[in-house]
Image (cartoon, rainbow, N blue to C red):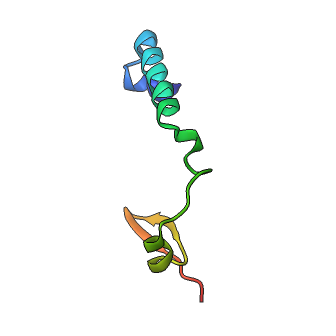
Amino acid sequence: MLRFLRARDFNIEKAREMLCHSLAWRKLHGIDRLLNNYSPSVAVEKFYPGGWHYHDKGLVTRTLGF
């Protein structure tokens, strides 16, 4: 809730409205179920067999199993 209050200069009504819109958007697009239903594409499995892990100074780093 604090992030919504900060975004709306601690105006409680505007922060509540922003939170409600955010929750509605998450429900509409199924954000909370996204990782449960995810399966990597063939290209991801072929070129990134170790997967993507972590971020370092804005750059994506990758771990490969040998």
Rendered residue at 62%/50% (across/down): 36
> Where, by quadrant of the figure, is residue 60 drawn?
bottom left
Residue 23: x, y in percent?
51, 26
On-image quarter of the C terminus: bottom right
User: What residue is rendered at 44% in x and 22% in y?
Assistant: 21
Give the image location of residue 54, x and y in percent. 51, 65
Toward the top, the furthest residue is 13
**Which residue occupies 48% across, 19% down?**
20
Name above or below for residue 17 compared with residue 48: above
* Residue closest to the far bottom: 66
- Tally of marks: 0
Residue sitting farthest toward the right:
36
Give x and y (percent) for residue 24. 48, 25
Q: What residue sits 43% from the left and 73% below the top?
A: 43
| x and y, in percent, of residue 7 in the image | 38, 26
Where is 26 relative to 34, above or below? above
Q: Nearer the viewer, residue 59 or 66?
A: 66
Q: Is residue 27 above or below residue 32?
A: above
| 59 to 3, vertically: above or below | below
